[in-house]
């Protein structure tokens, strides 16, 4: 395990990730500068443009720290450089972990388990995580120009009536994630049985994470401490993971 | 076409050109990384495992990616879309950030001003996130020996249950009517057919499909 962890945390890997992230940062700077100049050319107030930069920077600060907590959560299994890369580009914590788990099982492991990992599994999982999330990018490369032209050409529809029912689309994503969670929680319940290995730890950890999330939801919804929204997921996970260490030591 | 409209069209065409080139280059770089790391360590990705994993991931995430593209790109504008889809965290960070910035600037969707504000907002957000994570990673490096302690193995071995416990609470509380049957069926299946426990990646497909079906029926009956 030590050998695996030192390979996935090698200096070379850090350097490669840094190069890719510099490329993407330069892309962001180019887009920002071009848009700023275009805004001036279109007669927009410089104060408004500067305010956009400062408000977006401050707005992003807290959620970025929660992404950093996600890097810590992923780093124990996949190493810091890959976690750093995956959470800086394209993905989000939920996607990365779910896909890594699916890829680990497809490779023949019991799951994303650091004790079972080796370098072949690692590069396979990394490739599935990378290619699996390219859908949005492929859509942008091939269809964004046509799609935006079509949207601009289409006559703006006036909203007719206040009682118009929203589409199923918004519910579809929620339903999909409900199904996803049901499959995982069901498997943790199955692990309690002798046939499943009588392993209660995953269900206990999931239960602790759910309890923490319930407390956060209460504080957000009822007490209106909205700043917690940014941290609820990562913090619930880290508390539950810490509990796993304590339970393992005690038992 | 006014001069302003003409300028904006040319500007957008320029963004499309740079956006496409950089996205293609970025994608190639990202795909190359597992191969480079593999080559350094004398291994290559297992193509069978990759194909099996990708097929399961694709069933779930290709429709999600298409829906996100169709719904979010009009909100993000041209520049904002190219940047958001390469830098990620679209739903949880970029969209709220753009909505906040355009609210403050008071621009209307579909106008050139709105697109400019949106692009600047996404670019700034992405750069700040990169910087925060870089700072965090620099702080994490000295902590590596602690994070790699054997005693912490149970924590990292249970990162997936921790995620789905927290997410499950959130989504089940949001839609208990959709959740009840898939949760019960998946639990029964794993209890009575323990071999399925190791096949969670396959279970996701019927479970997600069932939840979608129940959601659709409830939606049609106005019971969501």
Image: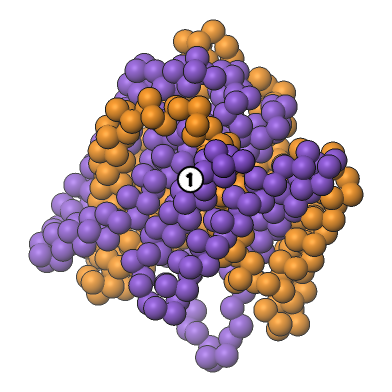
What residue is rendered at 83% in x and 42% in y? A194
Mark 1 Cα-neighbour bin, 10 Å: few <14, some 14–19, many ≥20: some
Image location (x, y in percent) of residue B217: 77, 74
Above-or-below relation of A221 to A129: below
Above or below: residue A17 compared with residue A228: above
Identity of the residue furthest to the top in this view:
B42
If the image is split into quadrants, where does the C terminus of chain B sit?
bottom right
Image colouring? by chain
Residue A200 visible in the snapshot: yes
Which residue occupies the foreground of this view, B166 or A92? B166
Q: Chain of mark 1?
A: A
The quarter of the picture where the N terminus of chain B appears is bottom left
Q: Residue at x 33, y 31 (%)?
A: B143
Looking at the image, residue A242 sits to the left or right of residue B55; the answer is left
Mark 1 lies on a secondary structure that is helix
Can residue A99 be seen here? no
Q: Position of residue B184 (x, y in %)?
A: 80, 62
**Which residue of the protein is positioned furthest toward the front in this rendering?**
A250
Chain corresponding to purple in the figure: A
Residue annotated with mark 1: A242
């Amino acid at each position: 395990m030590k050998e695996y962890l030192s390979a996935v945390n090698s200096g070379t890997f850090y350097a490669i990730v840094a190069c890719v992230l510099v490329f993407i940062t330069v892309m962001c700077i180019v887009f920002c500068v071009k848009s700023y100049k275009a805004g001036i050319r279109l007669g927009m107030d410089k104060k408004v443009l500067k305010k956009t930069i400062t408000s977006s920077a401050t707005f992003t600060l807290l959620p970025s720290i929660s992404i950093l907590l996600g890097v810590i959560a992923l780093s124990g299994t996949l190493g810091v450089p890959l976690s750093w890369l995956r959470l800086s580009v394209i993905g989000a914590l939920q996607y990365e972990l779910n896909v890594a788990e699916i890829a680990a099982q497809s490779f023949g492991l019991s799951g994303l388990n650091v004790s079972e990992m080796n370098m072949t599994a690692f590069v396979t999982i990394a490739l599935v995580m990378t290619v699996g999330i390219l859908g949005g990018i492929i859509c942008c490369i091939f269809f964004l120009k046509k799609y935006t032209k079509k949207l601009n050409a289409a006559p703006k529809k006036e909203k007719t009536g206040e009682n118009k029912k929203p589409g199923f689309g918004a519910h579809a994503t929620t339903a999909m994630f409900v199904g996803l969670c049901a499959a995982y929680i069901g498997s943790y319940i199955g692990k309690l049985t002798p046939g499943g290995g009588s392993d209660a730890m995953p269900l206990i950890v999931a239960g602790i994470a759910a309890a923490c999330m319930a407390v956060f939801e209460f504080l957000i919804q009822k007490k209106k401490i909205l700043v917690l929204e940014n941290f609820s997921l990562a913090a619930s996970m880290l508390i539950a993971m810490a509990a796993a260490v304590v339970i393992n030591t005690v038992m | 076409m006014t001069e302003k409209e003409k300028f904006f069209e040319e500007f957008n065409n320029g963004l499309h050109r740079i956006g496409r080139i950089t996205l293609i280059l970025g994608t190639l770089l990202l795909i190359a990384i597992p191969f480079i790391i593999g080559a350094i360590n004398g291994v290559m990705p297992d193509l069978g495992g990759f194909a099996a994993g990708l097929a399961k991931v694709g069933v779930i995430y290709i429709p999600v990616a298409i829906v996100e593209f169709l719904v979010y790109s009009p909100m993000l504008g041209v520049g904002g879309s190219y940047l958001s889809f390469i830098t990620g965290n679209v739903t949880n960070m970029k969209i709220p950030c753009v909505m906040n910035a355009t609210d403050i600037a008071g621009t209307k969707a579909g106008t050139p001003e709105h697109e400019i504000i949106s692009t600047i907002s996404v670019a700034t957000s992405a750069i700040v996130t990169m910087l925060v994570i870089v700072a965090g990673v620099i702080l994490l490096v000295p902590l590596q020996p602690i994070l790699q302690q054997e005693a912490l193995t149970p924590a990292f071995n249970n990162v997936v249950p921790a995620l789905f416990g927290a997410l499950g609470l959130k989504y089940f509380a949001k839609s208990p009517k959709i959740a009840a049957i898939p949760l019960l069926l998946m639990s029964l299946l794993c209890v009575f057919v323990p071999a399925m426990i190791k096949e969670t990646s396959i279970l996701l497909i019927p479970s997600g499909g069932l939840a979608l079906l129940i959601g659709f029926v409830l939606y049609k009956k106005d019971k969501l």
